[in-house]
Image (cartoon, rainbow, N blue to C red):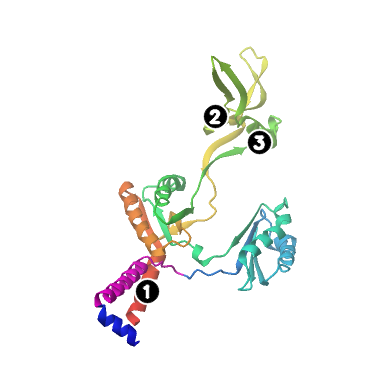
Amino acid sequence: MKKLAQFSVNYPVTVAMIVLGIVLLGFISFSRLGTDLFPDLNNPRIVVEIEAGERPPEEIEKQFIEPMEGTIIRQSGVTNVGSLSKVGSAQITVEYNWDQDMDEAFLDLQKALTSYSQDEDIEELNIYRNDPNASPVMLAAVSNPDITDMDELRKVAQNYIRNELIRVDGIADVRLSGDETKEILIETDPYILESHNISSSTIVTKIENYNRNVSGGSIEDLGQKYIIKGVSIYQSPQDLGNLVVGQTLVSDESGQSKEVPLLLKDVATVSYKNQDPLNIVRLDGKRCIGLSIYKETKYNTVAAVDALNEGFEKVKKALPGYEITIIKNQGKFINDAIGEVKDSA
């Protein structure tokens, strides 16, 4: 200690520069310190989700969940297995020891459930790790008082708003909820079909056969190669309505019968209709499009949210009449929590 004190007395400028360097280094490090809602923990939990049509929960439980749980419980390090079954789907939560290598456990579980993923009765099987920091950093609602068609609102939210927000620094993904997509609805009259000796399966086959592009090879001329393709994709309900589905007899002016093409619009009604939504989002009782915004892994949550707020302001200026309402702001919650710590310190 005497030598340190003597050195400080003999070289005050050097000591002052060292102290200032340490303070400057600390200031720079503090400004770059990441802020997140949860610490970066290796959460020992894996979730398995399956989709199996419209089967009732009891059938899904007996046919899929019980055999899968028996396979999962035999995996190394598993401490608890829980499941939740509902109509058409189920979720299995697998918990491991805290000292378990989760990368290895994830790969082992994927290998163990490979046979189930090949089951024709299972439409979809997803396996993912449960990370509390993977939740959306912001939830927002997009609406327009003058637009009631959710498909039109979806087009704006997906093609413009999402593309603008995903360019923001630190933003990894923007997912839509409550959206609807238009589809062509074909409503047939069973009595008309029976009178023309046509079945619904015949109409389905006709549509599948004609609604596709066919390659016609290629032609070379004067050193140029031309690709030939037969285009037969329907562009509108009118195109689909003009599809020939069979033949029918009609009488001409002389009273003689002759065969003429039977069109789809003669035996069915073809129209546009929005698909039934998977979920519905409402704000103050009115339909809207929900935005779930996710940040990049290990990116500063507060910085990502601040950049998002700037992005929302640009979108509002570019889209007059559209309302963007912030429902949940993880960055604000973190700032409020840090403020409470500062006030109590």
Location of residue 280 with respect to 132 vertically, above or below: above
Region of the chain picked out in magenta, as a range: 12-37
Residue at x 71%, y 30% (from the top left corner):
197
Location of residue 226 with respect to 335 vertically, above or below: above
Can residue 162 be spotted in the picture?
yes
Secondary structure beneath dot 1 equals helix
First of labels 2, 1 by sequence position: 2
Residue type at the position of mark 3: Val
Q: Is residue 251 magenta?
A: no
Give the crowd class for mark 1: few <14, some 14-19, many >=20 residues within 10 Å. Answer: few
Give the crowd class for mark 3: few <14, some 14-19, many >=20 residues within 10 Å. Answer: few
Q: Is the magenta stretch mostly helix, strand or loop?
A: helix
Give the crowd class for mark 2: few <14, some 14-19, many >=20 residues within 10 Å. Answer: some
Marks 2 and 1, Cα distance to the nearest angstrom? 61 Å
Q: The N terminus appears in which quarter of the rendering?
A: bottom left
Secondary structure beneath dot 2 equals helix
Q: Mark 1 points at which residue?
A: 338
Marks 1 and 3, Cα distance to the nearest angstrom? 61 Å
